[in-house]
Image: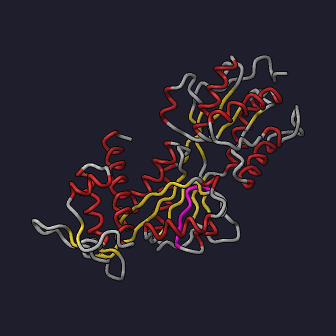
Amino acid sequence: MLPGVQGRIERRGIAVQLADRIESEIRTSVWTGRLPGKRTLAGRYGFNVKTVAAAIALLEQRGFLEPARAGRGRAIQLPRPGGRLHGGAAEQRLLVIHPSGGCVNLGDLELVRAMAERWEKLQGEVAWAGVDFPRCKSPGPLLDALIQRHSPDALLMLSAGEGWHRAAAERLPFYMAGGQFEPDLPVSLGAGSIGRELALVVKHLRGLGHRRILVPGDGGCDQIRRSVLDGLRAEAAGKPDTGTWEDYCPRFTEHVPEAWSGYWKKAFARLKPTAVVVFEDTALLSLYGHCHAAGLRIPQDLSVVLMSHDPRFGWLLPRPVMMRYAAKPAVAHFQRWVKGGLRPLGRKFFPLEMIAGSSVAPPAGGSRS
């Protein structure tokens, strides 16, 4: 993504967040009558005047502020029934719910940004909210709070955790970009098939001679873990060389650097893998750090594959083999949902493309003992 484009999107996102906050305060009567001037608001909220001006423009589009009058503060009003007004036509707002805590990779973030831009062109505004999915065991109350705060007409959920599909289905039209879904509920889902795509990666690694292939997960989803296990078993002729298939899919439950260092030490000491497949950017960085500390060379001693894609990892040495999601057809599928009146489209699985790197090679001397 070009720096100028990225910067524009980021500034837009900050202005939307500020507008969401002021809107919430208007709804709860923190602000009544007239809104103070831009400089006063900039001092109160800690943003620059340009960001405040952009937020004020958004609030006017949503119907919460009357048009500007020279020398006077902006009069506050509640939006008229029938939706927010923009250019004389009712518009709809999309709430993008994404993983928080730095767990979302650049490829996924660019995908939902492209979807958000498509919504802006076709429908109206976009608001953003980060959620710690693994720690959220009861999504209903949190989703209600997000809906109350942002007043969306529809939801776009990126890699949503367990229970979010059912909670969303009871509240608003929604589209899922990956994540966990309930097979008994209507859904509009665009994703990659974890089991199928992992089976292809495992087949490639086994073709090079690897037999002990480690695929750790964060322990947050039994459904995903079952798909990973299916992918591991798919290309195997029987039992693994050591232990069980579950041993090769360990749960790394605490998503903090110190914990993962210990997880790697334990898994490597027990299983002595010749290849590791990881799903998250943070897992890849942690694994590279462990290999450096343990004196393991990539790919001479260990092959590594990342099941997502981030172009910044082209700076790593060795460059990791990565799997890139089909962004263009995924955005087209999202657009089909929007133009189709936000009605459920069902599930659509897109293949991943393997991006060549230098982190994979045959195991030295065959499968290591």
Apparent side of residue 260 relative to residue 212 in the rendered image (left or right): left
Q: Quadrant of the C terminus?
A: top right
Residue 228 lies, in percent from the top left, at 74, 46
Image point (36%, 44%), residue name: 6
Q: Is residue 205 magenta?
A: no
Identified at 30% across, 55% down, the residue is: 44
Q: Main secondary structure of the magenta part?
A: strand
Q: Which residues are magenta?
A: 172-179
Colour setting: secondary structure
Depth check: 330 or 159 in front?
159
Question: Looking at this view, is 7 or 80 the one in front?
Answer: 80
How many numbered circles are shown? 0
Q: Quadrant of the N terminus?
A: top left
Locate residue 330 relative to residue 243 in the image: left or right: left
Is 174 contained in the magenta span?
yes
Seen in the picture, residue 145 relative to 301 is either above or below; the reply is below
- Return the residue nearer the eye: 225 or 43: 43
- Answer above or below: position of 298 versus 201: above
- Find residue 55 and report its horizontal and vertical position in percent: 29, 59
Taking 43 as reference, is 68 above or below it?
Answer: below
Q: Residue at x 49, y 61 (%)?
A: 334
Q: Is residue 268 above or below residue 56?
A: above
Expressed as whole percent of the image width and height from the top left, the position of residue 357 reads 58, 28
Farthest-out residue, bottom: 81
